[in-house]
């Protein structure tokens, strides 16, 4: 996913992401961040593989927080003037159904062109950790984990990209091959241009954001409280807001912290057949409209 952005479903940078899983009349359950279940010993062993000797950094509670020197694979590898900050630890069966993996996502050692960060993918084999690859640009701090029909795990992640006053957001499906290489499929996206506002309050801009994304629990999985396990799902609902506003309205909104009536909320529903997500027939028109707003 692209650059980390503030999350409207309960997460902040370095925080937890939760989402109510519901679609139609499905019972609601809670899913913690995809990082639930990561073992501290595995994280420590993995970090020691990528951080130069003696350059491991720790948080106040003693847990690993990154490297004081940029790891190999990053744009600024070996640079002692920059540090790699760990902000997401995601365990799962990503490369194969019978393989344990760990994804460590961090920032501080990559350029803007490389999304300011990326994710190291590891295999956990017989108590040992093996580095598989570095997926530059892959940000996984705002993700929910789900199960493919073949036993592998996947992620649905929220991310974004900011530049020159524009803030693009997206929700994408992330999967991994046997080598740990990631593939992303964007499901929906928005483009917000309110950051381009200047002194002229009459200028019209687009205000848009990804507000929420929620899984549809599979029948029989509604009461699953094991947050370390991938969700067994049959679909996904994404909530998006978009509308045209004046720069004067943007300034008023920032001052009052109140949403504008010109900005409308839309929901897009996707079905999941165990292999891929497909837009529901009743959501095709809405998705087409959102794509037109993004392109325009």
Image (cartoon, helix red, strand yellow):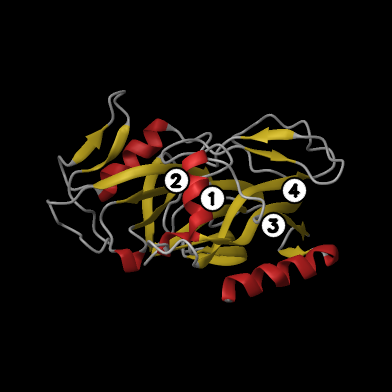
Name the N-terminal-most of marks 1 and 2: 1
Location of residue 276 in the rendering, given as x and y in whole percent from the top left corner = 71, 64
Q: Residue furthest left?
A: 80
Q: Residue furthest right?
A: 25
Q: CA distance from mark 3 to mark 4?
A: 14 Å
**Towards the viewer: 282 or 247:** 247
Is residue 101 visible from the viewing direction of this image? no
Q: Earlier in the sequence, mark 3 or mark 1?
A: 1
**What label sits on residue 99 in the rendered view?**
1
How would you rate the neighbour count of disc 1 (Cα within 10 Å): few for under 14, some for 14-19, many for 20 or more?
some
* Neighbour tally class for label 3: few under 14, some 14-19, many 20 plus, Cα within 10 Å: few
Label 4 to label 1, Cα distance in Å? Answer: 21 Å
Is 114 placed above or below 221 here? below
Identify the residue at image location x=18%, y=51%. Answer: 82
- Cα–Cα gap, marks 3 and 2: 20 Å
Question: Which of marks 1 and 4 precedes in the sequence?
Answer: 1
Q: Position of residue 4 (x, y in %)?
A: 43, 52
Q: Earlier in the sequence, mark 4 or mark 2?
A: 2
Q: Which residue is mark 3?
A: 150
Tag 1–tag 2 contact (CB < 8 Å): yes
The tag on residue 80 is none
Q: What's the residue at 44%, 62% (across, down)?
A: 161
Residue occupied by mark 2 = 124
- The quadrant where residue 174 appears: bottom right
Pointer 4 residue: 233
- Label 3 vs 2, first from the N-terminus: 2
Question: Quick one: SS at disc 3?
Answer: loop
- Badge 2 crowding class, 10 Å Cα cut-off, few under 14, some 14 to 19, many 20 or more, is some
Marks 3/1: CA–CA distance: 12 Å
Between the residue at mark 4 and the residue at mark 2, the CA separation in whole angstroms equals 26 Å
Please determine whether, in this image, residue 175 is positioned above or below residue 13: below
Q: Residues within 10 Å of mark 4 (few under 14, many from 20)?
A: many
């Amino acid at each position: 996913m692209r650059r980390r952005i503030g999350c409207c479903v309960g997460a902040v940078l370095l925080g937890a992401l939760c989402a109510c899983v519901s679609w139609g009349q499905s019972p609601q359950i809670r899913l913690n961040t995809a990082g639930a279940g990561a073992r501290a010993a595995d994280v420590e062993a993995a970090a020691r593989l990528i951080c130069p000797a003696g350059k491991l950094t720790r948080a106040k509670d003693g847990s690993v927080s990154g490297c004081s020197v940029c790891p190999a694979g990053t744009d600024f590898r070996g640079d002692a003037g920059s540090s790699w900050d760990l902000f997401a630890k995601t365990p799962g069966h990503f490369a194969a159904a019978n393989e344990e993996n760990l994804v460590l996502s961090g920032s501080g050692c990559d350029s803007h062109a490389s999304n300011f960060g990326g994710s190291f993918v590891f295999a956990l084999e017989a108590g040992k950790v093996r580095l598989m690859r570095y997926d530059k640009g892959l940000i996984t701090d705002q993700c929910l984990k789900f199960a493919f029909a073949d036993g592998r795990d996947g992620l649905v992640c929220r991310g974004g990209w900011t530049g020159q006053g524009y803030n693009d957001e997206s929700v994408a499906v992330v999967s991994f091959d046997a080598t740990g290489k990631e593939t992303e499929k964007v499901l929906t996206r928005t483009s917000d241009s309110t950051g381009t506002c200047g002194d002229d309050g009459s200028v019209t801009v687009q205000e848009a954001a990804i507000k929420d994304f929620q899984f549809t629990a599979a029948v029989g999985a509604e009461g699953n409280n094991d947050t370390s396990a991938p969700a067994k799902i049959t679909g996904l609902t994404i909530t998006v807001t978009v509308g045209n506003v004046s720069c004067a309205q943007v300034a008023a909104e920032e001052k009052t912290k109140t949403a504008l009536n010109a900005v409308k909320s839309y929901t897009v529903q996707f079905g999941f057949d165990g292999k891929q997500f497909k837009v529901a027939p009743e959501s095709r028109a809405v998705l087409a409209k959102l794509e037109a707003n993004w392109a325009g």
